[in-house]
Amino acid sequence: MKFEKKKFLTDVDGILHADYGTDLASANRKELYNALSRAVMSGIYPDWKAEKAENKRRCGYFSAEFLMGRAIFSNLLNLGILEEADEALKSIGEDLKQFEEVEDAALGNGGLGRLAACYLESAATMDIPLDGYGIRYRYGLFAQTFVDGYQHEEGDNWLKWGDPWSVRAERDAVTVHFADQDVRAVPYDMPIFGYKNGVVNTLRLWQAEPVQAFDFATFNDMKGERTATENFNATKITDVLYPNDNTMVGKILRLRQQYFLVSASLQDIVKKQKAAGHDLHELSRYYCFQLNDTHPVIAIPELLRLLKAEGFTFEEAFKVCAETFNFTNHTIMAEALEKWDVLALSDLLPDVYQEIVNCQRRLEADGLDGNKFYIIRDNVIHMAHLAIYVSSHVNGVAEIHTNILKTDTFKNWYERFPEKFVNVTNGITPRRWLLLNNPAMAREIDKYIGTGWHTDLAQLRKLEPHIEKMLPAFRAVKRANKEKLAAYISAHEGIDLSPDFIFDVQVKRLHEYKRQLLNAFAILYFYYAIKDGEITDFPPTAFIFGAKAAPGYYNAKAIIKYINEIAKLVNNDPDVSKVMKVVFVQNYNVSYAEKIVCAADVSEQISMAGMEASGTSNMKFMLNGTVTLGTLDGANVEICEEAGRENNYIFGATVEDVAAVKQYYCPTEMLGNDPKLRRVVETLRDGTFSDEKGMLKKLYESIVTDYGADRYLVLYDFADYVRAKMQLLRDYGTEDFDRKCLHNMAAAGKFSADRSVTDYAKLIWHLK
Ligand code: 26Q
């Protein structure tokens, strides 16, 4: 985008006059933020219009979550005007940094939602015609604080700074029908800017509103109760994001959200195809759809329904669906694979339910063994099976994950439809996750290999011959990033970290399978070893955690409490806090991640093998020059392939080991054989920590005494974890360690989302 300082400031001033009755001299922060953003928005209109007008085949990325984070910096970066806009502001005594106060758009939970956001940005950068379709939640993922060490949740009013990066597209509103109500769906469009290439794709987020405006006449006649309730029920659909990650709650409101999203999107697309004079039988010539996990899978029967309303036979409609839909699976956790009760779904969406039944009948008519292949069974609808049956492609998100889908989770389906299954390893956008969050490091890289890597991350390999020369600058930049993070943590968490300490980081959603508890146990183990004088030279380390627990996930919340108790013990112990600090940051989100990822020395990726479909923070750390301490799970496997296992710290049971160990595993035996581990685990119930709610005691039971205790082999992997962790901490500070860091950075090319979306475009969408 062309930038002209004077014109820009005049434009912003003009918007301040019109919208706020103020001017550049007296606008407050929020007014300035909105006016500046709107000035940019008005400038990009021609490019946006041009993209929409082009007659390209497009892919619609259907997702219940888009974890976008903050828009302003990444938009300005991609438009190529980040520095210019900052200078313009500085000329009037302002700057861009003040907008770090602006709320994140946290319309997602974790990995799956952030992946969708990265893919939109990368697709625009790669000039791939990909548009997102999602929900404009009024409240995003809850804001987290700790009260007495317990997680406390508050509503996330992300719109409190306004929404200047969206356009309300009133003219495209549609009505979505449920058995008990009609709801108006109004789209808000967000432009998605490619990196310095003039491409503008769209994220369309639907907001639920009452079909009829509030009717004062009836209200005054005292018949108003009904209108009022209907209005309330309509807006309720998009009120709030469900805060679950990798677990399912079968709430009917969630089904309403899902149907609302896909029905609005498909109605919109069908309407426009007809207006363009396209034959809907040939929809796949113009469109394909990517279903982001099972959440939007109800799009399949909805499109069947819509096409039949256009006069299609079921077979004709099925063919169109089979050509257009594709399905990505993000988890093998049985409890996260969406299932709906037949009665609940058929009550709410009888016509849609009928199409699911038709799919089940077609499946039966195909002559497939009903024990192996079913969409509906025992009055339960299996959304993943519906997706696999109808989609043309099914993909996992890392090699190991796709293999597990083929050989285990969806084995029967793979054997019958092997051609459908493909792998697309996840990726992250290097614009947000290096250029934006770590500009000093990016400039260092530019010095050696130019700027081609900004949109072709494989070029980072060219750094390899320069690693020796880069070491001092790498250390200096990392050090400066650690200082900044320490200052931020001091201000926000009230805990002081020394940048001389190793920053050992585990940030991700709180889940038992991710094993934050394993990390916690190791910290306590070191703590006692230091207290007892068994370790006298512990390498000074700050253990940093960030994670939100689903509000209804008891054990996850117990783990947060436990780690906060450990932090209190360690940080207040003068013997130990000289060499060890523990901090659990509050409200970990995209913006916090940007600060943490560039300042970490250790990236903890310690899930039980087979459980983490891919992981994507592992890639962000790697790109920023951080070694992985991890299991051979998810994308860690490919990270080691790319960067060399010798440059990372791998421990623990493999997928194969896990299967074997589970046959005989007995946690009490593990404890019996290891008194030091026993002492650590006992702190969950021996009064070391306050536990007025009995949460820690329950956690103890889930690890030691419950039936099937220690599902995720925390105790089994403990010894090898401590070994690998200690080795890493001891290696830190050597040139050899820094070399490992840079080898990781140089090998991160594969994990660019640019590569991922290009894979999707080639293997699945057949775009370009
Ligand atoms: C399902 C039903 C009802 C309520 C909630 C859900 C639900 C919500 C979110 C189920 C799963 C999720 C999120 C899953 C997720 O984020 N998975 C992660 O996806 C990343 C991107 O592919 C991977 O890198 C991670 O390994 C995977 O855990």
Image: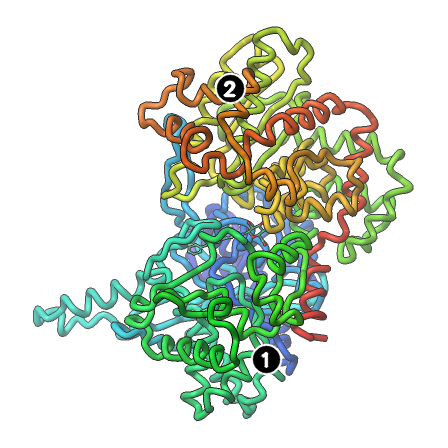
- Asked whether 705 or 762 is in front, the reply is 705
Q: Report the colour scheme.
A: rainbow
Q: Which residue is mark 2?
A: 678
Residue 539 placed where, x, y %? 68, 18
Q: Residue at x 65, y 50 (%)?
A: 432
Residue under numbered circle 1: 323
Q: CA distance from mark 2 to mark 1?
A: 56 Å
Q: Do we see residue 528 in this rendering?
A: yes
Q: Quadrant of residue 250?
A: bottom left
Where is 141 relative to 645, above or below? below
Give, as a three-letter code, the residue at label 1. Glu
Q: Residue at x 34, y 73 (%)?
A: 184
The amino acid at mark 2 is: Arg
> Which quarter shows the C terminus?
bottom right
Residue 7 in the image, given as x and y percentages of width and height: 63, 61
- Secondary element at image label 1: helix
